[in-house]
Image: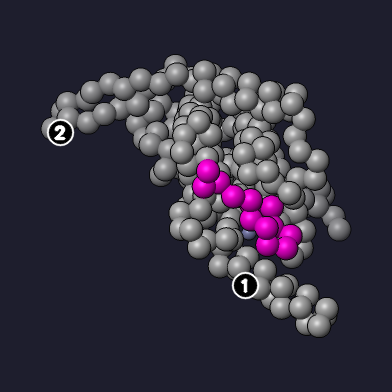
Amino acid sequence: MIYSMLSISKPVRIPRLSPLLGELLPVELMNTIWADRTGGHDALFDARGLRRWLDAVRDRLDLDGLPGSSARRVTPDQFVSARELRDALRCLAAVATDDPRAGAPASERAHRDAVRTVNEACARAPMWSTLEWRDEPRRIPRSAQPAVEVALARIAEQAVDLFSGPRRADLRACLAPGCVLYFLRDDRRREWCSPACGNRARVARHYRRHKLG
Ligand SMILES: [Zn+2]
């Protein structure tokens, strides 16, 4: 295939957006590692993937009005920070849920590092509000840091709420075959991250019984 000669850009692999389950944002960020029948995926494979994910959850970040909130650029440092925060949240979720999918439980050191990563992300972009009053009074979020870092700080803050509060007990690892997602159980009967996983788990159970029977 000739790409360069004709100045046709070489096709590049764009990371696929992870499934968004409508969970709290720290859980959605954990779930940027996901899997389907073709294998495992990382929606934060590169900076474009992070940008795409941030755009997809933008309405839930409450950053409108923040300078640079519509900026398209993600710096390499911000990309690294986002992945570190994501990996830290997955580590803490594995500890909180005794996740049997993770293999060996997280070491004490990994657990400690994950806590530190979350705390650093919270502190990196402090926010405050200002009141704007033209026709109608409205709140404008402010920060001295770029919007991507503010977004990560907000998610880290929500993670502190999640892990330190009563909802930690609702956090679950989805144990459907091949699934790597987490979810918050909002209903005592909910066992799976999604109806699709529930179906796959039932099929697998049926198959096992049939095979054993
Ligand atoms: Zn699942």
Q: Residue at x 46, y 58 (%)?
A: 187
Q: Residue at x 52, y 40 (%)?
A: 168
Mark 2 crowdedness (10 Å alpha carbons): few <14, some 14-19, many ≥20: few
Would you place residue 173 above or below residue 200 in this image?
above
The residue furthest front is: 213
Ligand 1, what quadrant?
A: bottom right
Across and down, in percent, residue 184 comes to 52, 49
Residue 171 highlighted magenta (yes or no):
yes
Secondary structure beneath label 2:
loop
Across and down, in percent, residue 83 comes to 66, 34
Corner quadrant of residue 46: top right
Q: Which mark is residue 136?
A: 2
**Looking at numbered disc 1 in the image, what kind of residue is underneath it?**
Asn
Q: Earlier in the sequence, mark 2 or mark 1?
A: 2
Across and down, in percent, residue 109 comes to 75, 24
**Looking at numbered disc 2 in the image, what kind of residue is underneath it?**
Glu
Give the residue number, with chain letter if any, for mark 1: 199
Residue 58 vs residue 114: left or right? Answer: left
Residue 164 vs residue 136: left or right? Answer: right
Visible residue check, residue 148: no
Residue 26 vs residue 66: left or right? Answer: right
Look at the image and give the residue range highlighted in magenta.
Answer: 169-181
Across and down, in percent, residue 22 comes to 47, 52
